Amino acid sequence: MSLKRENILIVDDNYDMLEVIQRQLKALAYHVYKASSVNEAIDLLQSGSIDLLITDIQMPGVDGFELIKYVEEHYPFLPTLVVTGFPSVNSAVTAMKSGATDYLVKPFTNKELKKAVEKSFRSKKASRVSLSHLSLPSPQNPISYAGIIGQSKSIQQVIDYIERVKSNRATILIQGESGTGKELIARAIHYKGSFAGNPFIAVNCGAIPENLLESELFGYEKGAFTGAQQAKEGFFQAAHTGTIFLDEIGTAPASVQIRLLRVLQEKEVTKIGATKAQKVKLRIIAATNEDLYRQVQQGTFREDLYYRLNVVDINVPSLRERKEDIPLLVDFFLSKYAKEYAKKKLELNPRVYEIFERYPWPGNIRELENCLQKLTIMHEEKVDISELPEHFKYKIDASGSDELISLEAMEKKYIQKVLAAVNNNKTKAAEILNITRKTLRNKLS
């Protein structure tokens, strides 16, 4: 009997069952690899070319459902056959939803196993075609307000705050994680309000060196310090009658905090080196991704300034707190970059949306935008799970899940890993293991 090309990996914590399935599959002329844990199975998947995964569900430590989810995202075209001795409707449904291609109940006959394996291999070929029949999410009634995209309750609340404060000069503190769009909200407040025709000056306090920030904000007179060849207006004077946006306000040094407090209290600015203050009429919007109140308690931010800034407090939700907005944002950015790069708008496999909604997005909307920009640049027309960066995909923490095993069992595990890496070529495996082919054959038997 000539051997088939397909490599099958069996995963089961029951060694007797592993041996039974291995004998049945060898009788059908398949190459077979065995793993008694999910951790061992992942090692074999990463080391060699596996064409079919057969796995049990109930195993100690990490179970079969976790392995199926992992395979579905890291090896999306690898068919998975579930075998279990504890059948139930719920487990069958969960297995299929997780990505399994078929479900087999123990005990089973050779004929039933053969039929299930052949069906699983056929499903592998069909899966590459079936993606085009899946419909993409189509958000209903998308909302765009001054560039703010979303229809979640949390973003609606932010928009409501903007509507309430847009036409008055109350000081506003915008708080939120990095990448959530704090400057976009500040601009929306300005340009949606009655001062839209007046200046909007954005200043990133964290991007300007500490020794320059004070002079940049408040200006200076000629000769005020070495290098001051002529008088210069500061950002506050430039924002007169409009809005000044102070991003990363928590990084402002103590000297700037004192001067800023006077601006808020007296509505006037004194240039460095000047003896007379200038009245300014403007709105101050500050933003931070730090916990300012904690900085107050630690003594790194002035308490009086904190309360002066915090007249109106707008908390911007992180992307993981408004996951229902992800399809809207994805559609917006895909359209934006398709137009920018003169390309056809990408289509995403619906499973990609599922991964996006599960991913925690530590970089928030900025990270999502960068991801979609890169996908648009690197791909044409369609994107599947396999095209996503590895850190988006399902992870299994299998550390410590394996029990302590004997030296013989460890040797067996390593030999299987080497065989998988060389696609079952026993001559190459023997060379890597530094043993003869005869010794390898004896160990395998």
Image: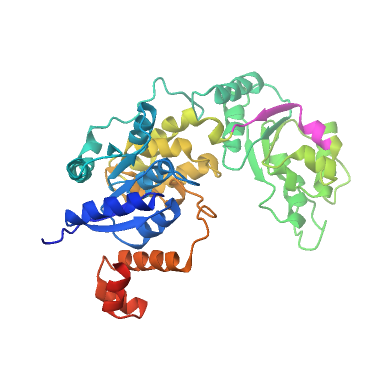
Instruction: Reply above or below: 115 against 148.
Output: below
Please tell me whether residue 235 belongs to the stretch shown in magenta.
Answer: no
Q: Which of 286 and 3 is in front in this view?
A: 3
To which quarter of the image does residue 79 belong? top left
Instruction: Reply above or below: 143 against 345.
Output: above
Residue drawn 64% across and 39% down?
Answer: 201
Residue drawn 39% across and 28% down?
Answer: 90
Please tell me whether residue 308 belongs to the stretch shown in magenta.
Answer: yes
Say left or right for 285 vs 383.
right
Instruction: Reply above or below: 242 against 252.
Output: above
To which quarter of the image does residue 338 belong? top left
Give residue 319's position: percent from left, percent from top: 54, 35
Say left or right for 55 vs 263.
left
Residue drawn 26% across and 66% down?
Answer: 424
Instruction: Reply above or below: 339 against 149.
Output: below
Residue drawn 28% across and 51% down?
Answer: 20
